[in-house]
Image: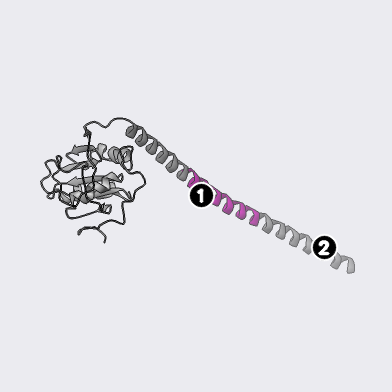
Amino acid sequence: MNKKRSQENQDRQARLAAIQSKQRAGERKRTALIFGGIGAVILVIIIAVTLVIVQQVRVNESREADAAQPIDGVQTFDDVTFEHVDDPVDYEQSPPVGGDHDPIWTNCGVYSQDVPNENSVHSMEHGAVWITYQPDLDQAEIDKLTELVGSRSYVLLSPYEGLETPIAASAWGLQLTVDSADDSRLTTFLDKYVQGEQTREPGAACSGGITPPGLVGS
């Protein structure tokens, strides 16, 4: 009888051990599947992020290459004066590309109303690009210009009364006129001339000056 019970106990223990072994194998399989799935997801994310970074690097390199070349249609104005004056200035270009100007600059940003010439010329002396557009320009075009400016800190965007072309981009001694906000030369102009080599006072601020009425988001 004792031998029989002993054998039964051994058989139960063997069956229990087999069940436990099977359970552990199943748990290992599930764990492998879970971690394998997580690993696959992580790998996909890494690949996607890498592709985005590579694409952005290529875009930046392309933009830098474009900015290194002359921009078709840009007019250059030499011997631009730069004295500080308190009186209104009669500028030769409209909008101006430089010249005598107010001692205080216009704070860079996006404006829905005209900004003063004399103060904005001072901003360009500090390396700002001033994008102007006809006051009756389609709102969709204005929205595209606003998006183009984005978070750039040395750009002025404003309507300009009497502008002869739909859009003009001006930097110190330089100007580009275009018919559409989709013109790729606008992006290249910003890449090349925002605090570009034409800047008379590199490192000077485009904040801390005056903020005319119409600053968007103020």
Which of the two residues, 145 or 125, is positioned nearer the viewer here? 125
Q: Position of residue 80 (x, y in %)?
A: 22, 38
Image: 215 above or below 122: below
Position of 50 with respect to 94 (left or right) is right
> How many angstroms separate mark 1 from mark 2 (CA)?
46 Å
Disc marking residue 41: 1
Tell me the kind of residue under disc 1. Val
Dot 1 falls on a residue whose secondary structure is helix
Q: Position of residue 201 (x, y in %)?
A: 33, 44
Q: Is residue 42 left or right of residue 117?
A: right
Mark 1 crowd level (few <14, some 14–19, many ≥20, 10 Å Cα)? few
Instruction: Tell whether position 213 is magenta.
Output: no
Q: Which amino acid is tagged 2?
A: Gln
Mark 1 or 2: the one toward you? 1
Image disc number at residue 10: 2
Residue segment shown in magenta: 26-47
